[in-house]
Amino acid sequence: MYILRGQSYFYTMVITVAVLLFVGAGLYWAFFYTPAVGTGSPRYWLYFANREATEVVGEKRAQKGVLTGETIIEELIKGPRTQNLWPTLPQGTRLLSFFVQGRIAYVDFSREVKENFGGGTANELMLVYSVIASLTELPEIAAVQFLVEGQVEESIWGHIDTSSPLMPDEQFIAR
């Protein structure tokens, strides 16, 4: 009987030591290998036209601070940093306002987005899907409504119906 008690004590000690080692290793890992919340830069994708203007291609970026839809549009206006990608928003374009309601992003551009547009169906597709693909990387956005100077227009550039919110179309987006 005494021997059985000794074995029971031995197994209890082995299990206790194993649990303590497991918990200690987990705490060590969490403390030394997990970055603190809020550190680092959020990574996101901006989409710009490829050379042939057949699809928009992602360019990975990092953002200091909180990533917002406004930031994404402002970065799209600045254009790509990568060779072989082309800007999609015309020079002089400004973001007048931006808000999200019911998973729809409302993007209000200055009149330059229309006046300085180079024209053509392909360029229009690249502009529209560059904005849509970039903004829908944010989980709170599923579609985009384009506005110019606060107004919804039936077709801002003449080829695509912009009178209602548009969703991503994967045939124009290289993900």
Image: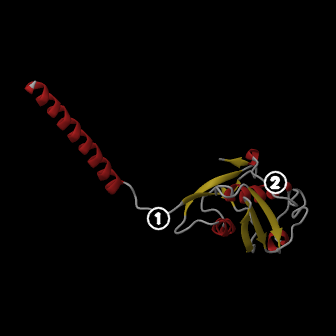
Residue 65, compared with residue 140, is above or below; it is below
Residue 11 on image: x %, y %: 19, 32
Helix or strand or loop: what does disc 2 sit on? helix
Quadrant where the N terminus lies?
top left
Name the residue rendered at 20%, 35% in the picture.
12
Callout 1 touching callout 2 (CB < 8 Å): no
Question: Marks 1/2: CA distance?
Answer: 40 Å
Residue 77 on image: x %, y %: 69, 68
Residue 5, compared with residue 126, is above or below; it is above
Q: Which mark is residue 38?
A: 1
Q: Quadrant of residue 32?
A: bottom left
Q: Which mark is residue 122?
A: 2
Query: Which numbered disc, 1 or 2, marks the residue that appears first in the sequence?
Result: 1
Q: Quadrant of residue 93?
A: bottom right
Nearer to the camera, 91 or 147? 147
Nearer to the camera, 26 or 128? 26
Q: Residue furthest left?
A: 2
Q: Amino acid at mark 2?
A: Ala
Name the residue rendered at 71%, 49% in the picture.
173
Few, some or many residues within 10 Å of mark 1 (<14, 14–19, 20+) = few
Helix or strand or loop: what does disc 1 sit on? loop
Q: Amino acid at mark 1?
A: Gly
Name the residue rendered at 78%, 70% in the picture.
108
